[in-house]
Amino acid sequence: MKALMTKFLFLISTCLLGTQLVSAQSLPSQSKPPQTNNATLVADGYEIKIKLNDYFKDTLLLGYPMGDKQYIKDTAILNKKTGLFTFKGSKKLAAGMYLVISPPENNYFQIIVSDTDQKFSLTTSNIDPYKEVKSTNAPDNELFYNYMSFLSTKRTEAEKANGMKKADSTKTVEANKILERLDKEVKAYQKDLFQKNAKSTTIALLRATQEIEPPAFIGADKDVAMYYFYKQHYFDNFEMSHPAFLRTPILFERINYYITKLTPQHPDSVIVSVDRILDLVKGNSETFQYYYIHFLNEYAKSKLVGFDAVYVHLAKQYMEKGLADAFIDKEQREKIMKNANALEPILLGKTAPDIEVYLADGKTVMLSKLKAKYVVFYVWDTECGHCKKSIPALVAFAEKYKDKEVKVLALCNKLSDKVADCWKEVKERKMDGLINAVDPFQISRYRTLYHVETTPALFVLDENKKIISKSIGADQLDDLFQHLLKEAEKGKK
């Protein structure tokens, strides 16, 4: 029951405000909240009057959460004659859960803004804002605060029952009966409330806080069955495209958990989950815009090996088809598509682009002709600090695995008259155990083919020259190959 009460009190217990509040106007373009073009939001504007007892400052802020950030929407100054703070604007507020914030401590309480709750007044206390709230012309907020008041009362009763068990073990049965009664009362209250107010924005938000109740699975695979059921039905209580969800912490937290905890952390699995989410939110253009950009940015900067595949997928399957034209300008789209097209040929599982480069004696070597179980392709520069740090690990790795059908092709990226520096470094750093090469006139186009923007760049290929790993440090090669060789041994058994 303790878990039950915590679940039902999600909206009250979740910490929405972090260490800072962000003004939307001051954010870089990629961090700004999306701006809606929905004409229905410009009707008569908004006017929210707040009387806050036990608060002695002259300023209140109106903010809202979006994703993992919070934004400031408006500021209200105390009218000393009426004792009211008034938030007012010529355009209607987008639906969502807003925060009335009292600086400088940034204490806050939540209010619901729906298409109908745009002009209302509310009186409460700065000390305990969820107790004895009085509202006028705010049916959604009335529902919200009544619900919170009811749950607060039940939570107090549940805490007493749990305390009874801890204090006296002989009262466990009695306490459990109280908890069971409270559970039934809460569920009955919710069922009645949700049925009578099915179209309310508040009810849509509250329903989303309820966990899925799976059937009772039996058998040896019951945990697996439970997982698949839970993952499949995870969003059942969500109206994903409801415009109000974008301005709450609920949807972002739910989506983040689905992607990072319920989805196996493999690019192919993540792509399926991302596609599912974008499909579920596509009914609201602003929500789709927010999460598309969120995922695009998230996987553009991902440090996880192979997760650039998610970025490429988002660009090719959505942007290339014109689904981002309305909210990403042409210049940015062209840059993103150029980047995605460059990355696509070198994703994990792709056959490495073939190149022909030059050895110290002037002879050439082709990557595709290297006969080995594994090939490590390494691009470096004589003036690169990271290269200088990683080359000793690369040399040690090559020595350790030289008898295990592993070859290292180390390509120095100096041009024409600077090539001599490469051979000097090769000698000084004792890189004789590697296949050292140069391409002084960039004839192989390796920079373009392998999207080499910085050095060092490292790719691990199998015997068929398929890319099996990349973008790792030379000091990580030993661990990787221990795993690869161990898996290869298992395959022989």
Image: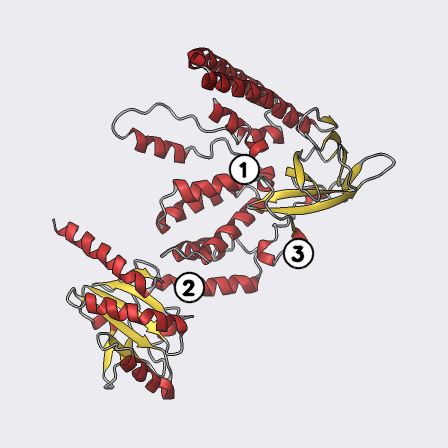
Q: Is residue 399 above or below residue 261?
A: below
Which residue is outermost to the left? 493
- The amino acid type of the residue labelled 3 equals Ser
| Cβ atoms at labels 2 and 3 below 8 Å apart | no
| Cβ atoms at labels 3 and 1 below 8 Å apart | no
Q: CA distance from mark 1 to mark 2?
A: 35 Å
Q: Which label's residue is closer to the chain start, 1 or 2?
A: 1
- SS type, badge 2: helix
440 to the left or right of 29:
left
Q: In the image, which disc is placed on residue 250?
A: 1
Q: Determine the image quadrant of residue 205.
A: top right
Q: What residue would you read off at disc 2?
A: 341
- SS type, badge 3: helix
Q: Determine the image quadrant of residue 140.
A: top right
Q: CA distance from mark 2 to mark 3?
A: 33 Å
- How many marks the image carries: the answer is 3
Q: Is residue 327 visible?
A: no
Q: Which label's residue is closer to the chain start, 3 or 1?
A: 3
- The amino acid type of the residue labelled 1 equals Ile
- SS type, badge 1: helix
User: Residue 347, position in %: x, y?
Assistant: 35, 60
Q: What residue would you read off at disc 3?
A: 26
Way the structure is coloured: secondary structure
20 to the left or right of 399:
right
User: Residue 13, position in %: x, y?
Assistant: 56, 33
Q: Is residue 215 above or below residue 481?
A: above
Q: CA distance from mark 3 to mark 1?
A: 25 Å
Q: In the image, which disc is placed on residue 208?
A: none
Which residue is outermost to the front? 167
